[in-house]
Amino acid sequence: MSNELKSFLEGLDSLAQDCESRKGQACSLKELEELRVEFLGRKGKLAGMMGQLGKLDNSEKPEAGQKANTVKQAITALLDSWEAELHKAEASEALSKFDPSMPGRKPWAGSLHPVTLVMDEVCNVLTGLGFEHAAGPEVENDWHNFEALNMPPEHPARDMQDTLYVSDKIVLRTHTSGMQIRSMLKQEPPVAVICPGKVYRRDSDLTHTPMFHQIEGLLVDKNVSMADLRGTLTVFVRQIFGSQTDVRFRPSFFPFTEPSAEVDISCVMCGGKGEKDGSTCRVCKGTGWVEILGCGMVDPNVFKSVGYDPEVFTGFAFGMGIERIAMLKYGIGDLRMFFENDVRFLEQFA
Ligand code: DAH
């Protein structure tokens, strides 16, 4: 063995020892990386030794090369094992700072929209009274929405409902009352249905939105009277607004009912007194009453348009706006809140 080879091999051995003795310098992953660069980097100590390889005799190069490889693997294994130790220490330190008894953060969950809540509640009360649920199209023809409901083309009552037309004879339904017609055409009496859904009108201001929700009710049978209507709606109102609520029927007009009435309830804000905290109640404007729905006895002309005999059957119908019920129930002052979807508003109903 030549002297050159001997000192080359010794140099490699002392490189390995040198690395081993530096363990104390690798207290962090950053320091370890510095060691890795120092020994194994492109301009590191091992690479420096490899530069000497060319000076050896060709016959001695294989042995020197093999030894260099072994030392490289040993140093790599050493550094890897230190790295694993550091990772382990880091993890256990992080774990020691972790308090498993700390309460978790709750994920943010959505909730039902107040219109949905009230719609569900109204439907539940009415299905509890025996009404069945019916659904129909929001794009409706003129006949179901108007004509069959005793509103012929020139009828002035059509003006009450700023209609959105899809075409000459097709409209976005202006009310759910057209579902009375669809329900009666589907079956013979007795009929007891409720029809909740969206309705549309060309109207937009503080108290009107182009789309809102209604629910329609219809009961047809032999001997249905105004007393049945009054009893049904009184039970309904007291379930929604509380048992102390007073109900009054005020004469009104709708083309599809005769007689017709609007139903008022004692004001939800002032309890019917007309004043609250010494000033005029802002909800009922001092009258003590708030209007909640329209109703009446089904007009004989409506029965004729669906082929029911008005001499045999009578019935009552009612319709109400869900947003209005929700505003009264929750004391919401501005209709637009329902459609802005401000989370601060919606969260209050969770
Ligand atoms: N359709 C009416 C409206 O949208 C509400 C209504 C009034 C419905 C009287 C009825 C009723 O069924 O009998 O204003």
Image (spheres, rainbow, N blue to C red):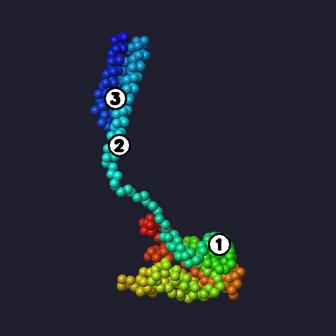
Task: Indicate left or right for 217 with 44 as reference.
Answer: right
Task: Indicate left or right for 201 with 42 as reference.
Answer: right
Task: Indicate left or right for 163 with 266 as reference.
Answer: right
Point out residue 226 in the picture as x, y percentages from the top left corner: 59, 87
**Which sits earlier in the primary sequence, circle 1 or circle 2?**
2
Q: Find disc 2 in the rendering and name its residue.
A: 91
Q: Find disc 3 in the rendering and name its residue.
A: 38
Tell me the CA gap for discs 2 and 3. Answer: 27 Å
The answer to whether mark 3 is within 8 Å of ligand 1 is: no
Q: Which one is in front, 296 or 283?
A: 296
Q: Amino acid at mark 3?
A: Glu
Point out residue 334 in the picture as x, y percentages from the top left corner: 46, 74
Q: Find disc 1 in the rendering and name its residue.
A: 140
Image quarter (top left, top right, bottom left or bottom right) of the C terminus: bottom left
In the rendered image of this protein, does residue 300 appear above or below residue 16? Answer: below
In the rendered image of this protein, does residue 166 appear above or below residue 99? Answer: below
Q: Secondary structure at mark 1?
A: strand
Count the marks. 3
The answer to whether mark 1 is within 8 Å of ligand 1 is: no
Point out residue 348 in the picture as x, y percentages from the top left corner: 43, 68
- Residue name at image x 65 percent, y 72 percent: 140
Mark 1 closeness class: few <14, some 14–19, many ≥20 residues within 10 Å? many
- Residue name at image x 33 percent, y 43 percent: 92
- Residue name at image x 50 percent, y 70 percent: 117
Mark 2 closeness class: few <14, some 14–19, many ≥20 residues within 10 Å? few
Asked whether residue 132 appears in the rendered view, the answer is yes
Q: Amino acid at mark 1?
A: Glu
